[in-house]
Amino acid sequence: MEVIFIKDLKNQGKKGQIKKVKDGYAQNYLIKNGYAVIKNKENLTKLNNEIKKKEQEAGIKQKEALAQKTKLEKETFEFKVRTGAGDKVFGSISVKQIKEALEKKNYKIDKSMIKIANPISSLGFHNVDIELYSNVYATIKVHVIK
């Protein structure tokens, strides 16, 4: 019997996957517990409509991310820090501080989206990457001043 998975099931199938399984397993476990439905025209149509809808939503999100990228890359974010002898910076600029600076300018960015290769602990301009969507990265300028 062929079934369409409607939920992820570890080591069995992912949502939207079509798989051939034994009749008893399909009826007594997968369908009964809501992990899958029988493959037929109606359920295939639902699956195809769901896939099209997800693709459209992904396209919209990617366009929004690209628009946000162009706005972000025009901005420069300044951070004032304390320095010691020889302009040595005390501490470093954290992801949390960058997130707060973005929020002050009305950007809704999650901390996990901000990618810092090395801690920002010197004066001057630094580039910070932000992953806005899969394969859409914005590079913002961070200016550290004393």
Image: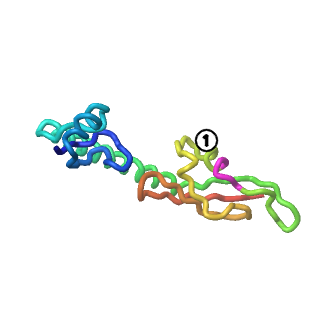
Dominant SS in magenta: helix
Label 1 sits on what residue type? Lys
- Residue 53 image offset from top left, x and y in percent: 26, 41
Q: Nearer the viewer, residue 89 or 57?
A: 57
Who is closer to the viewer here, 49 or 97? 49
Q: Along the horizontal axis of the image, is 120 left or right of 2?
A: right
- The residue sitting at the top extreme is 32
Q: Position of residue 68 (x, y in %)?
A: 45, 49
Quadrant for the N terminus in the image? top left
Residue situated furthest bottom in the rendering? 86
Q: Position of residue 19 (x, y in %)?
A: 22, 49
Is 134 rendered above or below residue 41? Answer: below
Q: Which residue is mark 1?
A: 104
Q: Residue at x 25, y 45 (%)?
A: 51
Establish if 140 lies above or below 46: below
| Outermost residue, right side | 85
Q: Residue at x 59, y 46 (%)?
A: 102
Q: Position of residue 79 (x, y in %)?
A: 70, 53
- Answer left or right for 99 relative to 12: right
Left or right of residue 117: residue 80 = right
Q: Residue at x 64, y 51 (%)?
A: 95
Q: Which residues are magenta?
A: 93-97
